[in-house]
Image (cartoon, rainbow, N blue to C red):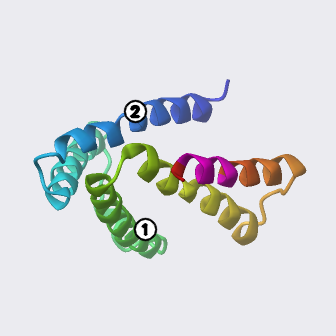
């Protein structure tokens, strides 16, 4: 199996526990504080990984692709603040599937913007994903 498949599996397994742990934490913590604390851990950990790999951030600060990363950072911030708040207000079993629609939208963007291959199987998967999310969140 290709390395990216294993990494994807590890990522989804790790991320699968985020929403339940957040819901427990936010019984007594404000959602904005939860975003700050959890992302502080991420920031520090990524910093240690960058250092351990001997990478330097400086050469990439003015890279032509850096504005894309900055725009993504703004969108990620908005997405996480609203996702955490939704988890603080609603049940995991409804919030997570709705949030999961990002998979459908990202797939469609990949098809439209990057001219990725469209197959009947991909179209069926996207349609079934939307149906599954609708059924789970109603």
Query: Residue 123 in the image: x percent, y percent?
Result: 81, 54
Q: Quadrant of residue 81?
A: bottom left
Looking at the image, which residue sits at the far front?
138
Q: Quadrant of residue 24?
A: top left
Above or below: residue 129 compared with residue 48: below
Q: Which residue is mark 2?
A: 14
**Marks 2 and 1 in Cβ contact (< 8 Å):** no
Q: Residue at x 28, y 60 (%)?
A: 85
Q: Residue at x 32, y 37 (%)?
A: 20
Of the image marks 2 and 1, the number of the one nearer the N terminus:
2
| Disc 2 to disc 1, C-alpha distance | 22 Å
Mark yes or no: residue 71 visible: yes
Q: Which mark is residue 72?
A: 1
Q: For this view, does 110 lie left or right of residue 29?
A: right
Magenta stretch, residue numbers:
130-136
Q: Along the line of sight, which residue is nearer the eye, 68 or 107?
A: 107
Q: For this view, does 63 lie left or right of residue 113?
A: left
Q: Main secondary structure of the magenta part?
A: helix
**115 within the magenta span:** no
Q: Residue at x 10, y 47 (%)?
A: 28
Q: How many marks?
A: 2
Above or below: residue 86 compared with residue 28: below
Q: Along the line of sight, which residue is nearer the eye, 120 or 118?
A: 120
Above or below: residue 48 compared with residue 83: above
Dot 1 surroundings within 10 Å: few (below 14), some, or many (20 or more)? few
Q: Residue at x 61, y 60 (%)?
A: 106
Q: Along the line of sight, which residue is nearer the eye, 64 or 110?
A: 110
């Amino acid at each position: 199996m290709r390395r990216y498949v294993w990494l994807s599996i590890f990522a989804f397994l790790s991320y699968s526990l985020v929403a339940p742990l957040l819901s427990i934490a936010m019984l007594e913590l404000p959602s904005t504080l939860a975003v700050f604390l959890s992302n502080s851990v991420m920031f520090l950990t990524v910093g240690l990984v960058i250092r351990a790999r001997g990478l330097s951030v400086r050469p990439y600060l003015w890279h032509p692709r850096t504005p894309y990363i900055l725009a993504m950072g703004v969108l990620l911030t908005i997405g996480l603040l609203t996702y955490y708040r939704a988890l603080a207000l609603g049940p995991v079993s409804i919030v997570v599937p709705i949030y999961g629609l990002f998979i459908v939208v990202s797939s469609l963007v990949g098809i439209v913007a990057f001219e990725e291959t469209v197959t009947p199987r991909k179209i069926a998967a996207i349609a079934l994903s939307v149906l599954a999310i609708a059924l789970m969140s109603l």
